[in-house]
Amino acid sequence: MRQEEGRLRLPRIAHLVPALVKGGGERAAVDLANWQFAQGWQVAIIAGRFADEALLRSQLDPGVDVRYISRRAGRIGIYPAGLFWLLKRRRWLSGFDVIHGHLSFSAAMLTALFLGRRLAKLKRPALIETYHAVGMPIPAYAKAAHRWMATLRDGFVLMAEDGHWRDFQLGHTGLVEIIPNGLAALPALPSSDASVMAFAEMAHLPAGDRLVVGNIGRLVAERRPELLAKTLCCIGQSMDRSVHFLVVGEGPECEAMRRLFADAGLANQSHLPGQALDPRIPLSLMDLYISLNVGPVTGLAGLEAIHCGVPVIAIQLDERYASGTEDWIWSDQSVEKVSAEALRLLGDPRARRELAHRQWQHARSQFSVEAMGRAYERLYADVLAECGGQS
């Protein structure tokens, strides 16, 4: 970073997100912004549309500058609103060293900024995108669009290895990095906590001697909720003792999941209470968490479970990936094999405790917000050097 008047000037960063809602990419951006602000950086978050501030805005440090492009536009309307907003505030945006985009709306806005910067024959501010849809089954036309837009960046980040992007990594002349999402530590809550007991009652989870297998996430098609539901049904139909399934989140696939549970005769053992503002509350009720992995990498909700001491196994979305003994989260593409591993752990409390402890240690050292923040700090420095340094 540039030296000015005998001291080191810290970078000025603006993060672009579609909205401050519950989602892996949004949560990573918020944790990264909080960490950067704590280091003394000037940090802003630009959200495409307004959302209930209790969802994620409340988790931002009050010192982080938050700007909303629109308080009324919907998911589609924020695109034209965003283009007008960027044009109107181009002088303010030029004061940042880096504009860092997350998710599809931000990818479109970064592309507009890049083209505008090229027309003006400028190199600044540096434009970086983090691609959070690694491994997700998105349409081919959307992948092609993202690949084209990725060429119009000063830096491009994948949050995990992805075979679809491997040739892009090898052939692209710009800076392309793999930076796993990190997570700020979450202190676990005891099961006796009043908020935990109230959530269990609201979700109609029975008290007493029962096991709970769970997941937290948006119930949308690209996150493959049908695979999760089929895995949970397989577990429920194979267990002798009482097991319950807690699926926390909202989305258009919610009713389809309910039908799958009902068809399997597990309607009374399945619980879909909707969204939880504090993930620690439902996690405190779970004995085992089933995540979705892309290669060796899990989502932020899986990391939250591990930070809270819940053992995690995963459904593997990368068909070419074979889980090995060195993997810190065991995974497989087969619903039956994931179910069998879950049944083994559910029948062995000691194995669950040992797995949870190993995963917690690994997450604290490798998937912390500090590890993510330092990796981005190095990337910013490299990108700014390519763009001619800080102004």
Image (spheres, rainbow, N blue to C red):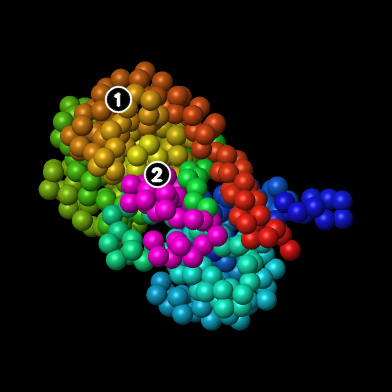
Q: In this view, does 288 lie to the left or right of 192?
A: left
Q: In this view, does 347 lie above or below 315?
A: above
* x and y, in percent, of residue 5 in the image: 87, 55
Residue 174: where, in percent of width, then height? 51, 56
- Of 284 and 313, nearer the camera is 313
Q: Is 85 drawn above or below residue 365 in the view shown?
A: below
Residue drawn where x is 46% and y is 24% of the image: 357
Residue range (magenta): 147-174
Q: Which mark is residue 7?
A: none
Amino acid carrying label 1: it is Leu
For the view shown, which residue lies furthest in the top direction? 350
- Is residue 201 visible in the rendered structure shown here? no
Which residue has dot 1 on it? Answer: 345
Q: Toward the viewer: 219 or 8?
A: 8
Q: Which mark is residue 161?
A: 2
Residue 95 seen: yes
Q: State the residue at coordinates (39%, 44%).
A: 161
User: Viewed as shown, does residue 305 lie left or right of 174?
Assistant: left
> Is disc 1 surrounded by few (<14), some (14 to 19) or many (20+) residues within 10 Å?
some
Image spot of residue 179 (x, y percent): 50, 45
Q: Choose top left, top right, bottom left or bottom right for residue 65.
A: bottom right
Q: Which residue, as the protein is rendered here, is positioned at the far right? A: 5
Q: For residue 328, which quarter of the picture?
A: top left
